């Protein structure tokens, strides 16, 4: 055991060392996401800003792609982090895992450079292969898609082989099946078709079935592990609840896909299916509320990592509001006819992604910070504890500010652009010039700066938290984390 | 099949839809809290939240013309019933899954959030 | 272990999770097959590519209580009638162009994408193109040189994406084809550009 409060990779097991690399890139890409978001937001206010240099489409592509990739890096990191503990075995094929990390990261860098420097190509298949696929969130050119699939397969091999050599826990089993589904879904986004309806039909398989099904369950697995280690909740209980969650999430989320099949050329029955299952989608979130209260009431609230716990609670709340409340507000076709494709969607998208996923990954960053400094104290009256609190406060103030501003903008758009003006070009710009909209864009930008400040504090905190701390981690539980 | 919401009702729809989920969450929260802390005094508040949910759902259904069709009326009915019983069901599950714990000697365990 | 009820056991919930997931997925696959018969080109809601040889309109349908695409008399794009294969190739090139230029990161198509610029679902039918006679040419010129055509009072301009004339024409074909997709009434209340002929011809509207 090395000195407390000093970063030392000797504190980590093999999988965790690799996880740290993923976390580092993840954190950096989070920064890139924020940067390009701020630039894109500025273009709403000053349309000539960077016009013809880094156009809105380029900033936005980088903004949403960085988002997807930093979260995926966070999830992969989280999985490697828990793998050895969970399987009770060293990561199988760690060397390969490391190699693939570098290959993947190099690919990400090349893709980003091409987005920035090449930007667009001629109307030929080679543009799709080399530059940009032109489909929101999964723009990565085809060569990179293939690279991603290979990288994910290697990752999958690491995970499966490690569980197979060690032991399969309930969490492990769910994790493996979920990763398989997550990777398989990506294939649904890897083909070209001239038919825009067919294109969007499959595009939503990737986007929706990721964020409303497989990602939720992946986060569920990672959080289940976190609850065992940071709170000492008993494995049998955690695993039963993981199964319940899978049943509820997949039961509502898979056919909830229908809420994206209202207006893309798909048949009428999707209006009913989409409406029905999205009305169910908040149910798992309500279930979590009951269970969280039950647990906190039955057991003493005590844990060894306050920032991680705070972000875990934020995850539950963020998921409830972003996905549950904001999702349901615009999901019935009777109203989605007017909100579809307005800032309304952006309001929901921001709160849901941040609330459900960014929070979870940030919680994991804190777990990693703690262990890499030799399991230092991170409970009450932590030295420099203001940093994580203020960074969290700024991130949330920024996010809530943005979400509210976009909500107002979307409300105005749904009325003026969609309902009154019938979504014509004139209608679009009438709505964009409306004082409510213009004001909302200003507030979004101000909130974006608050959010950026929170990000800077977060990075600073992650690099310093627990430094020179001399107390060891708060004693929590005896051996209950181990038995499977 | 569907009758889109009238312009004048947009706000009502957003607002009541949000309230349905918020009241659903609040009902679940109060319900669980009343049980866990063994404070039956709070139970009426929980059901008050549910009443809020029910009223919101009915107003929403009216504004979104859901009662014009049998299918959408059914969805409303299922939501009303589902959100009423869900916290009860989940509560039983909590008790059931934690059945092997010894509540008298509190373990160092804490909220299970996922 | 001790007093666990059967309905709270991990194994029951593991099985439930598997069955519910499997069941939902099987339903989804079934629905996907059925949906394909609606959305393949020439399917029940998505027209074949040669629709670009005809007039496409968008009108309110009282019986259906929503806007529907209405296919009118022959009105070939750029005055040249294409075979199904030629039309398919042209629309495909246009679609590829929208991807290569990343239109979707400023605009929405069928309502999906980004919100910095107008929805393109019915761009072909937008009254802003002036009149039916000049529309095609206007669209091509706009796509090739959008930077000096400010269409709004807020100073937002589309950038020059290096679209060639050939690409622009293909893109217009794609947009015309897309406007004929039956999107169940989205966008609602959209008033299409006037496409009526001289009073004489009152072509019977047919539906896709
Ligand atoms: C964590 C979970 C969720 C995330 C991360 C998420 C994220 C998103 C994002 C980013 C979009 C915009 C997609 C685009 O670019 O067009 C979107 C759209 C949408 N989401 Fe969610 N969502 C989640 C959960 C939900 C839930 C639970 C519901 C329903 C109850 C829902 C309903 C919708 C609907 C109806 C749309 C379509 C909006 C439109 O018509 O433009 N979402 N979601
Ligand atoms: C400084 C903070 C941020 C700013 C200024 C910002 C700004 C923007 C802008 C301008 C867009 C384009 C919307 C449009 O097309 O009109 C956008 C889209 C998006 N952003 Fe952000 N963003 C920020 C942070 C975030 C964060 C933290 C997340 C998630 C964790 C996020 C997720 C998204 C998503 C999912 C979309 C696509 C939404 C859709 O298509 O509906 N953004 N953002
Ligand atoms: Fe969705």
Image (cartoon, rainbow, N blue to C red):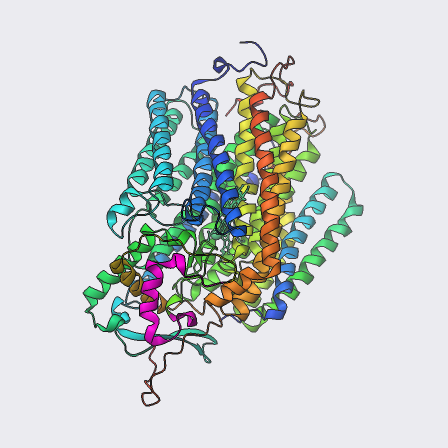
Quadrant location of the N terminus of chain C in the rendered image = top right
A261 with respect to B30 (left or right): left
Which quadrant would residue C185 be assigned to in this image?
bottom left
Residue A423 visible in the snapshot = no
Q: Residue furthest top?
A: A2
Q: Provide residue C17's location: percent of width, then percent of height.
A: 47, 43
Magenta range is C125-152
Prevalent SS, magenta region: helix
Q: Provide residue A361's location: percent of width, then percent of height.
A: 52, 33
* A238 w.r.t. B61: above or below: above
Residue C150 included in the magenta stretch of the image: yes
A42 with respect to A201 (left or right): right
- Please report the residue visible at 31 percent of the width from the left and 38 percent of the height from the top: A144
A425 with respect to B93 (left or right): left
Q: Provide residue C24's location: percent of width, then percent of height.
A: 43, 52
- Please report the residue visible at 40 percent of the width from the left and 41 percent of the height from the top: A182
Q: Provide residue A275's location: percent of width, then percent of height.
A: 51, 60
Which quadrant would residue A354 be assigned to in this image?
top right
């Amino acid at each position: 055991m090395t000195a407390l409060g000093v970063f030392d990779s000797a504190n980590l097991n093999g999988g965790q060392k690799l996880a740290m690399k993923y976390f580092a890139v993840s954190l950096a890409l989070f920064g890139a996401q924020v940067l390009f978001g701020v630039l894109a937001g500025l273009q709403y206010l000053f349309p000539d800003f960077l016009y013809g240099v880094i156009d809105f489409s380029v900033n936005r592509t980088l903004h949403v792609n960085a988002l997807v990739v930093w979260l995926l890096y966070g999830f992969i990191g989280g999985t490697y982090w828990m793998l050895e503990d969970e399987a009770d075995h060293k990561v199988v094929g760690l060397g390969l895992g490391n190699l693939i990390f570098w290959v993947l990261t190099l690919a990400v860098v090349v893709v980003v450079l091409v987005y920035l420097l090449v930007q667009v190509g001629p109307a030929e298949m080679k543009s799709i292969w080399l530059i940009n696929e032109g489909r929101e969130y999964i723009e990565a050119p085809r060569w990179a898609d293939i690279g991603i699939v290979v990288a994910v397969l290697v990752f999958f091999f690491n995970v499966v082989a490690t569980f197979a050599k060690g032991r399969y826990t309930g969490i492990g089993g769910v994790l493996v099946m979920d990763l398989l589904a997550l990777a398989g879904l990506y294939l649904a986004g890897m083909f070209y078709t001239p038919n825009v309806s067919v294109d969007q039909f499959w595009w939503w398989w990737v986007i929706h079935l990721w964020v409303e099904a497989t990602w939720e369950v992946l986060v569920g697995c990672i959080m289940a592990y976190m609850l065992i280690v940071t709170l000492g909740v008993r494995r049998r209980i955690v695993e039963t609840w993981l199964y319940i969650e899978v049943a509820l999430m997949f039961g509502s989320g898979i056919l909830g896909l229908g809420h994206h099949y209202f207006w893309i050329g798909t048949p009428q029955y999707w209006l009913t299916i989409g409406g029905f299952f999205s009305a169910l989608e908040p149910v798992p979130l309500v279930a979590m509320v009951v269970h969280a209260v039950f647990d906190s009431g039955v057991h003493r609230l005590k844990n060894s990592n306050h920032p991680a716990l705070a972000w875990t609670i934020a995850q539950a709340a963020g998921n409830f509001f972003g996905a549950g409340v904001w999702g349901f507000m615009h999901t019935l076709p009777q109203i989605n006819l007017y909100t579809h494709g307005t800032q309304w969607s952006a309001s929901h998208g921001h709160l849901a992604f941040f609330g459900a996923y960014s929070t979870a990954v940030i919680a994991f960053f804190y777990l990693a910070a703690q262990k890499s400094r030799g399991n230092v104290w991170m409970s009450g009256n932590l030295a420099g504890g203001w940093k994580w609190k203020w960074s969290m406060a700024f991130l949330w103030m920024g996010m809530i500010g943005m979400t509210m501003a976009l909500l107002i903008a979307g409300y105005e758009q749904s009325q003026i652009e969609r309902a009154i003006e019938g979504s014509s070009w004139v209608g679009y710009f009438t709505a964009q010039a409306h004082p409510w909209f213009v004001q909302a864009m200003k507030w979004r930008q101000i909130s974006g700066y608050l959010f950026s400040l929170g990000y800077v504090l977060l990075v600073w905190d992650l690099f310093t938290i627990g430094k020179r701390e001399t107390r060891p981690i708060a004693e929590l539980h005896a051996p209950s984390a181990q038995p499977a | 099949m569907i009758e889109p919401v009238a312009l004048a009702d947009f706000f009502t729809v957003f607002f009541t839809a949000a309230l349905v989920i918020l009241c659903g969450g609040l009902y679940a929260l109060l319900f669980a809290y009343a049980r866990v802390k063994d404070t039956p005094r709070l139970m009426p508040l929980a059901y008050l939240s549910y009443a809020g949910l029910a009223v919101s759902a009915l107003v929403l259904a009216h504004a979104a013309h859901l009662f014009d069709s049998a299918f959408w009326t059914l969805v409303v009915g299922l939501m009303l019933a589902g959100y009423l019983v869900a916290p009860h069901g989940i509560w039983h599950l909590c008790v059931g899954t934690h059945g092997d714990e010894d509540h008298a000697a509190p373990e160092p365990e804490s909220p299970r959030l996922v | 272990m001790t007093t666990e009820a059967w309905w709270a056991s991990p194994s029951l919930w593991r099985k439930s999770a598997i069955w519910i997931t499997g069941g939902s997925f099987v339903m989804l696959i079934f629905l996907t097959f059925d949906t394909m018969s609606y959305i393949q080109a020439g399917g029940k809601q998505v027209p074949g590519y040669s629709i670009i040889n005809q007039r496409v309109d968008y009108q309110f349908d009282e019986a259906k209580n929503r806007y529907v695409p209405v296919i009118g008399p022959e009105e070939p794009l750029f005055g040249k009638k294409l075979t199904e294969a030629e039309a398919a190739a042209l629309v495909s090139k246009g679609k590829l162009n929208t991807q290569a230029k990343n239109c979707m990161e400023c605009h929405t198509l069928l309502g999906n994408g980004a919100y910095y610029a107008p929805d393109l679902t019915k761009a072909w039918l937008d009254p802003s193109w002036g009149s039916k006679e000049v529309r095609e040419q206007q669209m091509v010129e706009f796509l090739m040189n959008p930077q000096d055509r400010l269409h709004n009072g807020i100073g937002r301009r589309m950038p020059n994406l290096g679209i060639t004339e050939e690409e622009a024409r293909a893109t217009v074909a794609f947009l015309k084809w897309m406007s004929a997709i039956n999107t169940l009434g989205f966008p609602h209340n959209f008033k299409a550009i006037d496409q009526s002929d001289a009073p004489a011809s009152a072509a019977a509207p047919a539906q896709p």
